[in-house]
Image (cartoon, rainbow, N blue to C red):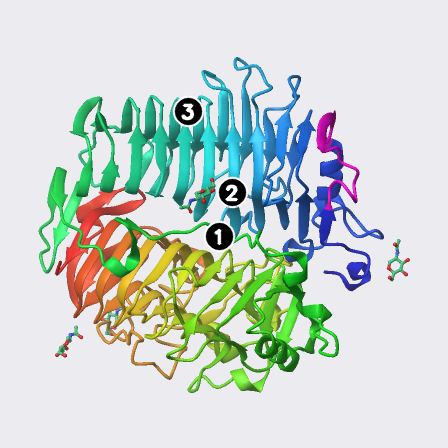
Amino acid sequence: MDSKYKDNYTVFRNVVKDFGADNTGQKDAAAAISAAIKAGPSNGPDRSSNSMGTTGQPAIIYLPAGTYLMKSSLQLYLGTVIIGDPTNPPVLKASSDFADDHIIYAKDPNFGGTINFYLGIKNIIIDSTGVGADKSITLLDWTVSQATQLTNVGFNMPTNSAKHVGLTTQYDYNSNLILNDLWFKGGATGMKLSGQQWVFKNISFSGTTTGVQAGGTDIVFLGCRFEQGTLGIDAQGTSGSLTVVDTTGVGMGTLISSSSSNTAGNSIVLDNVQNSGATVKIGGQTTLSGNVANTWVHGHLYTSNNAKFQSQQGQTVTTSRSSSLLSGKNYFTMAPPTYKEYSTGQVLNIKNVPGIPVYGDGETDDTRNINLILSRYKTSCSLMYFPAGTYIVTDTIFVPAGTRIIGDAYASTISAVGSNFEDESAPRAMILVGYPGDVGVAQFSDMVFTVADVLPGCKLVEVNIAARSPGDVGFWNSHFRIGGAAGSQVESLCTDDPNDCKAAWGLLHLTSTSSAYIENMWGWTADHDLDGDNPQTISTGRGLLVEGTAATWLIGTGSEHNTLYQYNFQYARNVFTAMQQSETPYWQGAGSRALNPAPWQYLDSSDPDFSNCAANDSKCRMALFERIYGSSDLFLYGGCNWVFFNNNGDCSGDCQTNAIDIANSTSIYLYGTNTKSTTNMILEGTKVIATQSDNAGGWGGVIAGYLYDS
Ligand SMILES: *[C@@H]1O[C@H](CO)[C@@H](O)[C@H](O)[C@H]1NC(C)=O
Ligand SMILES: *[C@@H]1O[C@H](CO)[C@@H](O)[C@H](O)[C@H]1NC(C)=O
Ligand SMILES: *[C@@H]1O[C@H](CO)[C@@H](O)[C@H](O)[C@H]1NC(C)=O
Ligand SMILES: *[C@@H]1O[C@H](CO)[C@@H](O)[C@H](O)[C@H]1NC(C)=O
C-alpha cells in the first residue's frame, strides 16, 4: 500500500459497531455494509477505485450475529472478505421489494473474471425467502478465480420457486478451484455455472429443483448430498469430465443427466455414490440406476502399458481405496476450522506479545521473535493470530507441534529475504513444520507465503510432521505467491529473462514423514503484476513435491507456472486429491530463452531431468504438469493441465509435448484427467501411452479413467 495511506487504513471493519448496520432485521442494512466494504484510508480514495493495488486494500467485513435486511445489492472489490460470526451465522435477508437481480456481486467489476483473486465469504446465510417465488433473483454471483474462499454459507430460498437461483458465475470467464461446506435450500437452481474448473466439497441441496447446472471443463463433486429435487447435476455443459465421489441422492428424479457424446468429452465417473432410481441419464435414456458401490466410468478408459483405450458407455471398475485416507467408507474431509470454541483470551496476537515485538511491517526482520513466540507458546494451546501485514524473515521459521496459526485472509504474508536463501545447491525452508518423526497438531489458515527477493535457495514450506488424527496437520485457504505484487523485488527484477530470475527453489514439500490435509491452496508463480504494470518472467523451480507415505489429502489445489513441474509424487503413498489445477510458465516453449531443466542447475533426485527430450526441443523441455515416480496408492480425481502460451506469446496447436509422466509405480488411479494444447497426455517412463488427439474432447483431451498397475 502507498505509504502515505498506511497509517490511515483499517483492515478490520465491524459493520454494526463501526458502520451502524442494523442487525435486527428492521431497517435496511445494505448501505451501511456497502460503506464498510468501500471504506479506504481516511485520507485517501475508497476501495472501489482500486488505486492501492490488488494486494494493497485487504478488508475484513465482520458481521455480528443477527438479521440484516437488504433492499439493494452488495458489490465486493478485490481483497474483500466477508466473515460472519461462526457461532451464530448472520442472515442477509432480501426485502420483499429488493431492487436488484443479485444480493451480492463478488466479482470486482474493474477486473476480468480470471484475475479476480483474494475474495472471500464465510459463515453467513443469504436468504431470499422474503422475495416472491415468482420474482427473479439470484443470491450470489461468484465469477471469481483462484485464492478465493466461499465456505460455510447457506442459501435459503423458497421452495417451489421457478425463479430463485442460489449462485451464478455469469459475468465473465473464471478459473476457480473450490467451493466448500455450503447448503442450498429451495429455489429453482442451486448453482448455475460457467467457467473452467471446480471441486465442490460437502455441498448439500434440499428441495432445490435443479441442484447444479454444471457448465465447465473439469468438475468434481466430493461428499455432496442432493435431496428432494428433480435433477441433481445437469452435466450437459460439462465439456470435459464430471467426477462424482462419495455423494448421495435422496428422493431425486434423476441424479445426473448429460447429453450423448461420441468423443472423450462429457465423460462421467462415479465413485461410491448412493441413489435410488435414475442415477445417470444420457441423452434422456437411463444408463445407470441405483447405487455405485465401486467406480463407474463413462468415457475413455486406459489400463497400464496399453495405448489402446476402451471407449466405455458405463463400465464398473474397482478402486481399492487406502484405509488411512478414509473416514468410514468415504474419503476423509473436514470443514475448515473456525476455532469458534476458542475464547478471545486464547487468541494470541503475534504483534502484541509483551517484550517480544513482532512488526509485520514489511521492513523489520521478525525471524527471531516469531521463532521465540512459537517455541514459548507451543504447549499453551493458543491460537496464534498474525494480523494483516508482511512479516519479513531472514531465516527459517520453525513451527513446532502444538501450533495453530490464523491470518487475515490474503493479507498475512510471510516473506523471505537474505543470503540464507540464496544457494540453489542447498535449499533452505522458510517455514519448517516439525522435524521428521514429530507427530501432533500444526494448522494454518488464511496465510500467504512469498519471497521478498530473488532467492534460488528458498523452499517456502516444508512439512515433516505427521497428524495424530486426520486434519491435525493442515492448511486451509493458504496460498503461495512468487512475484506479481508490491513488497517483493521479484516484481520489479523479473521482467525479462528467466535465466536471471530463479525466484525460489520450490513452493511446498511434503516429506516422507509428513501426513497433512490441504484444502484450497494456490501455488502461484505470477504471470502478471497485480499491483503494477511490470511484465513478469519468473522461474520458480518447483511446485508441489509430495513424498508423504502415511496419508495425504489435497483438496482444491492449484500449482501454476513453476518451472520443472507443478505436481511431483516421489515415492509417495496413500494420497487423495480432488482437483489439481495447473498451468505451464507462459515463458516456456518454442522461442524460450530457457529450456528445462534450465535455468536450474542442481537437480534433486526427485527432479525430472528431461533427458528424454532432444537438447533443442523447446516444447518437450517444458514443465511436467505431473510426475509420479516410485509411488503407490494414489487416488487422483480431476486433473486440469492447461497450456496457453509459448515464449510469452500466443501459440496455436500443440504448445507442449508432454503432460503427465508415471513410472515404477503401483496402484495409481487417475479419474477425470484433462489437457489443453498438449501432444501427449500420459507417458509411462519414456513411452507415450495416451495422446490428446486420441482423446479429443473438452478443452483438448479428456481421459475418464487411467488405471496404472491397479
Ligand atoms: C492519517 O494518519 C496520521 C498518522 O496517524 C494522522 O496524523 C492523520 O491525522 C490521519 N489523517 C486523517 C485524514 O485521518
Ligand atoms: C458440511 O458443511 C456444513 C456447512 O454447510 C457443516 O456444518 C458440516 O460440519 C460439514 N460437514 C463435514 C462432514 O465437514
Ligand atoms: C534440433 O536440431 C536438429 C539438428 O540441428 C534439427 O534437425 C532439429 O530440427 C532441431 N529441432 C528443433 C525442435 O528445433
Ligand atoms: C524403474 O526401476 C528399475 C529398477 O530400479 C530401473 O531399472 C528402471 O530404470 C526404472 N524405470 C524408470 C523409468 O526410471
Q: Mark 1 sits on what residue?
A: 336
Of the numbered discs 2 and 3, the one sitting upstream in the chain is: 2
Residue 84's place in the image compared with 190, above or below, is below
Q: Report the number of discs.
A: 3
Image quarter of the N terminus: bottom right
State the residue at coordinates (52%, 84%).
Answer: 422
Question: Which residues make up the magenta segment?
Answer: 14-30
Residue 134's place in the image compared with 495, above or below, is above
Q: Mark 3 sits on what residue?
A: 208
Within the displayed image, which quadrant is ligand 4 positioned in?
A: bottom left
Q: Is residue 155 magenta?
A: no
Q: Is residue 23 magenta?
A: yes
Q: Are marks 2 and 1 in contact (CB under 8 Å)?
A: yes
Depth check: 230 or 115 in front?
A: 230
Residue 203 on image: x %, y %: 41, 39
Depth check: 132 or 660 in front?
A: 132
Of the numbered discs 1 and 3, the one sitting upstream in the chain is: 3
Q: Nearer the viewer, mark 1 or mark 3?
A: 1
Q: Mark 2 sits on what residue?
A: 152
Name the amino acid type tagged 1: Pro
Confirm if mark 2 falls within 8 A of ligand 2.
yes
Residue 622 on image: x %, y %: 33, 66
Name the amino acid type tagged 3: Thr
Q: From this viewpoint, is residue 573 visible?
A: yes
